[in-house]
Image (spheres, rainbow, N blue to C red):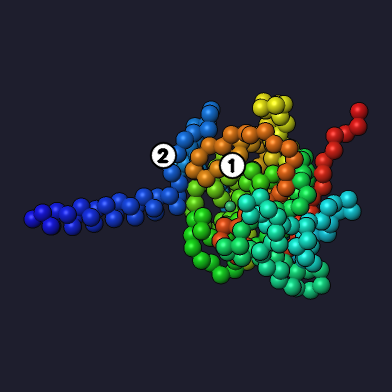
């Protein structure tokens, strides 16, 4: 009898664990709230934005404005480094040659994130990316990467085409804080673009004088409209601001072979008085 009860208990525990793991694909109901928000971080009941079909999926790579700093245009990874214990090294991602000047870089699982050598504050950032055409995994395990501005504030990159996950974790989300206004995702393998306008936070000592703001245009569609970033973006937790100078942009390695083909940035200056 005791053995039977133990077996039933074990099965129940395994099933409960499986259910919990399954639930986390669609969100959480135990994570904290950001102050003033009615939603938990990755709240499973937060409404998921509806899909909009963009008109620019798989378009040719865009041209680069004359005053942009080109961070990647298919030639090389010379503007990027890996960081291991704070020490810069060669980026571990793969350069895939296309036509001259039209190559791509691909995340190599296990080879770490990559960071720009330069640091940036207020900026306009253009990034072209594609999730793998072969669909593997689901929720956060499908085509996950990310653009972490200052290495701290993530605009989520994810294959969000017909892929259910928590609303604040899908493509175009300010991760863990704001779902995109709509789901403007292209199909897996198709080229997509983000245009991000980022206002860097300002600090005086340990005080936040001005929080960061982000506007995100995904495939020509506004998905974040001058949203106030609430602090560093965290997995399943709230982030807070920690004073920092201008810092590099990070592209996230989430162990799926997401590709990038064009990254440029324009530093935004204040209008002269
Ligand atoms: Mg990510």
Looking at the rendered image, the quarter that the N terminus falls into is bottom left
Residue 134 disc label: none
Residue 134 drawn at (x, y percent): 56, 70
Residue at x 40% of width, y 50% of height? 23
Residue 232 visible in image: yes
List the residue tagged with mark 2. 30
**Of the pair 87 and 216, the residue shown nearer to us:** 87
Furthest residue in direction right, as rendered? 273
Whichever of labels 1 and 2 marks the residue nearer the N terminus, that label is: 2
Q: Is residue 152 above or below residue 70?
A: above
The quarter of the picture where the C terminus appears is top right
Residue 240's image quarter?
A: top right
At x 83%, y 59%, the residue is 63
- Where residue 184 appears, as percent x and y from the top left, is 63, 53
Report whether residue 187 is seen.
Answer: no
Vertical position of residue 228 compared to residue 134: above or below: above
Q: How many labels sit on residues? A: 2
Q: Secondary structure at mark 2?
A: loop
Q: Is residue 110 left or right of residue 210?
A: left
| 222 and 252: which is toward the camera | 252
Hey, which quadrant is residue 74 in on the image?
bottom right
Residue drawn at point x = 61 percent, y = 62 percent: 111
User: Which x, y percent locates residue 136?
Assistant: 51, 66
Q: CA distance from mark 1 to mark 2?
A: 17 Å
Viewed as shown, does residue 27 lie left or right of 5? right
Q: Outermost residue, left direction?
A: 1
Q: Residues within 10 Å of mark 2 (few under 14, many from 20)?
A: few
On the image, numbered disc 1 is attached to which residue? Answer: 233
């Amino acid at each position: 009898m005791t053995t039977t009860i133990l077996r039933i208990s074990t099965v129940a525990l395994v099933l409960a664990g499986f259910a919990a793991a399954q639930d986390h694909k669609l969100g959480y109901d135990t994570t904290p709230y950001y102050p003033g928000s009615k939603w938990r971080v990755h709240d499973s009941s937060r409404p998921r934005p509806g899909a909009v079909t963009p008109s620019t999926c798989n378009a040719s790579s865009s041209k680069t404005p004359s005053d942009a700093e080109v961070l990647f245009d298919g030639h090389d990874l010379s503007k990027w480094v890996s960081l291991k214990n704070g020490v810069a090294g060669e980026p571990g991602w793969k350069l895939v040659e296309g036509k001259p000047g039209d190559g791509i870089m691909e995340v190599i699982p296990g080879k770490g994130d990559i960071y720009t050598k330069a640091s940036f504050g207020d900026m306009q950032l253009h990034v072209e990316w594609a999730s793998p055409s072969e669909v593997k995994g689901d929720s956060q395990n499908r085509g996950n990467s990310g653009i972490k501005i200052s290495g701290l504030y993530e605009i989520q990159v994810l294959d969000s085409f017909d892929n259910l996950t928590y609303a604040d974790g899908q493509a175009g989300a300010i991760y863990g804080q704001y779902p995109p206004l709509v789901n403007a995702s292209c199909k897996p393998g198709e080229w997509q673009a983000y245009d991000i306008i980022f206002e860097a936070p300002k600090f005086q000592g340990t005080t936040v004088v001005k929080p960061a703001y982000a506007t995100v245009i995904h495939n020509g569609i506004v998905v974040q409209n001058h949203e106030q970033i609430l602090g560093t973006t965290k997995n399943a937790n709230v982030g807070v601001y920690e004073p920092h100078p201008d810092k590099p942009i990070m592209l996230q390695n989430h162990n799926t072979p997401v590709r990038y083909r064009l990254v440029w940035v324009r530093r935004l200056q204040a209008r002269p008085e």
